[in-house]
Amino acid sequence: QVQLTESGGGSVQPGGSLRVSCAASGRTFSPFVMGWFRQAPGKEREFVAAISSSARTSYVDSVKGRFTITRDNAKNTISLQMYSLKPEDTAVYYCAVSQLIHYISSRLSDYEYWGQGTQVTVSL
């Protein structure tokens, strides 16, 4: 059974940093695209970043230069290092895996496995 478990969320002041991680279990995920999405209160879930099996990456414009997605295939994990956090980054962050595609996608429907989410709050 495939399971994704996020960790590392929390509260931080604007300008601060956080790292969220996702541990995948149930199978080997090295061949697949993995990504991070987020959902703020009252808003739809949105793409944040994704990484392919060859470590190519893609980011939504609002986080470029501030967030970095990485993966460790040996440990079946991905991480999102977030710097210069802003109040508008406040959201529940979800990791996701796609077995359907082998290219980076920002579409929610391309990802069939999801974690339960971890809260990131940026405020004074």
Image: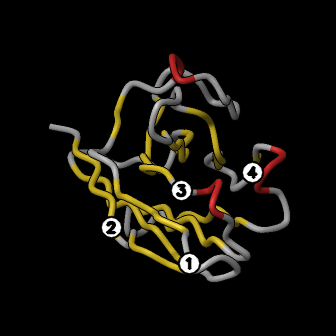
Three-letter amino acid code at the position of disc 1:
Leu
Q: How crowded is mark 1: few (under 14 residues within 10 Å), some or many (20 or more)?
A: few
The amino acid type found where label 4 is placed reads: Thr
Which residue position is annotated with label 2?
7
Q: Residue at coordinates 45% horizontally, 39% vertically from top-left?
A: 41
Residue occupying image coordinates x 48% and y 61%: 78
How packed mark 3 is, by other alpha carbons closer than 10 Å (few <14, some 14-19, many 20 or more), is: many
Q: Distance between the residues labelled 1 and 2?
A: 22 Å
Dot label at residue 1: none
Q: Is residue 10 toward the left or the right of residue 26 in the image?
A: right
The quarter of the image holding the C terminus is bottom right
Question: Which residue is labeled 1 in the image?
Answer: 124
Q: Is mark 1 on a helix, strand or loop?
A: loop
Mark sitting earlier along the chain (1/2) = 2
Residue 94's x, y, as percent? 42, 46
- Amino acid at circle 2: Ser
Mark closest to the chain's N terminus, 1 or 4:
4
Q: Where is residue 47 in the image (x, y as percent from the top left)?
A: 62, 37
Secondary structure under badge 2? strand
